[in-house]
Image (tube, rainbow, N blue to C red):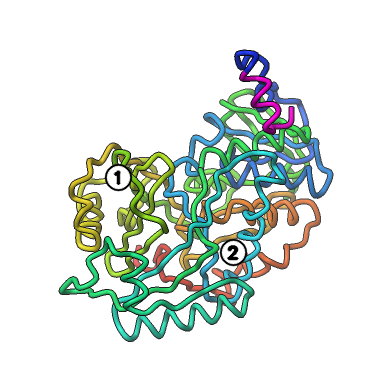
Amino acid sequence: MRYNAFQILKQGLAGNRGWRPAWRKPDPKPEYDVLIIGGGGHGLATAYYLAAEHGLRNVAVLEKGYLGSGNVGRNTTIVRANYGLPGNSQFYSHSLRLWEGLEQELNYNVMHSQRGIINLFHSDGQRDAAARRGNAMLNQGDDAILLDRAECRAMLPYLDHDQTRFPIYGGLYHPRGGTARHDAVAWGYARGADRQGVDLIETCEVTGIDIAGGKVTGVQTTRGAIRARKVAIVVAGRSSQVAAMAGLRLPIESHVLQAFVTEGLKPVIDHVVTYGMGHFYISQSDKGGLVFGGDLDFYPSYAARGNLPMAEHVMEAGMTLMPMLGRARVLRSWGGIMDMSPDGSPIIDHAPVDGLFVNCGWCYGGFKAVPGSGHCFAHLIATGQPHPAAARYRLDRFETGRGLMDEEGTGAQHNLH
């Protein structure tokens, strides 16, 4: 069934009794060409592009829970391409272009809203850094506008621009950035992959990876053994645990990142706003809730919930930047498990085991990377060669030291542990 205005009218008049399930619920087959471990945004996007772009349809996605139950539904929904270093800049630019055509390609409303992102700066040095980043973005073919104090005041009148410690000097405006509905992104890719013949197998936890003669032969699951010529690991914060089943030790640490949402309010925030000095970011959802977050809980954890000291820090930063936030009631909070790499940049590469592929290390950048990650990972799996947009995301850079991309210095510091 193709979604369109006619179907909405037709089904509405018929009592909405004719809608079909968005995807099938198949049992696993004994063997596939490709098995994708992980039914989040990256895994579902990979499956979709394997079928749509490369014609590989004997593919299964294995998810231990339900589709979209992990990080793709546990984030602050931000989409952007405002990176400055070679490698990351090309990749996120590629991903943003895919975002811009995603709804038409999937025939699914992912609620992609290019409302713009403003990264605030608070000193002359930060202004210089923002100018350098903006010029790098323009050279990449993306958009960037350097705002002065007056322009920031006009666009963001609800902020405390004269706060004593970190007065706002201006901001770097990325108009094509914005947000998307995280659940809808997972559902759209799931529906698209299913329509291409991909099997989406829920409640199927992988318990082992079978290897013979240095080559992957399949996996063991809670629903039995499944053979495969190729196996792809794309499980976000669980990357280290799943890779260990194949005897691999990845340069990854898992940390919790919390997010919060308030009660629904009248429209007040038109953009996504980031406050670097407080490591705070905020936007307003379509329901009116203010969605915001902060920094990692700085200890390794696999718990999808955070601690109170970091929650307090986020609230303090929010109140410093936007004092009226104190009058809003926080409805709920949640935590996503971040797979932090040492240089803060991801890995899309072959594993040392023949036929095994890894996609991990997305740190803070996982949601906005969903289309680009799936597109590039599918290219690697299908052709054996890295996609040009992800050519710098090699696993061996952490072994050799060549090609490290320390974009923000926010990755795990393994030398300290």
x, y percent for residue 232? 66, 46
Compare residues 187 and 212 and report the one nearer the observer: 187
Sooner in the amino-acid sequence: mark 1 or mark 2:
2
| Position of 297 relative to 399 (above/below) | above
Task: Assess whether residue 259 is covered by the magenta stretch.
Answer: no
Q: Is residue 362 visible?
A: no
Main secondary structure found in the magenta portion = helix
Residue extending farthest left: 164
Compare residues 204 and 311 and report the one nearer the observer: 311
Magenta stretch: give its range.
1-12
x, y percent for residue 132? 48, 83
Compare residues 329 and 399 and report the one nearer the observer: 329
The amino acid marked with disc number 1 is Gly
**The disc label shown at residue 76, or none:** none
Cα separation between marks 1 and 2: 28 Å
Badge 1: residue crowd in 10 Å (few <14, some 14–19, many ≥20): many
Q: Which residue is mark 1?
A: 306
Quadrant in the picture for the C terminus: bottom left
Q: Is residue 64 visible?
A: yes
Quadrant in the picture for the N terminus: top right
For the residue labelled by badge 2, is the local secondary structure a helix, a strand or a loop? Answer: helix
Badge 2: residue crowd in 10 Å (few <14, some 14–19, many ≥20): many
For the residue labelled by badge 1, is the local secondary structure a helix, a strand or a loop? Answer: loop
Which of the 4 image quadrants contains residue 148?
bottom left
Q: Please name the residue shown 59% across and 64% down the image.
A: 92
| Position of 75 relative to 201 (above/below) | below
Q: Which residue is mark 2?
A: 92
Q: Please name the residue shown 20% across and 51% down the image.
A: 312
Q: Please name the residue shown 57% across and 69% down the image.
A: 88
The amino acid marked with disc number 2 is Tyr
Compare residues 353 and 83 and report the one nearer the observer: 83
| Position of 196 relative to 177 (above/below) | above
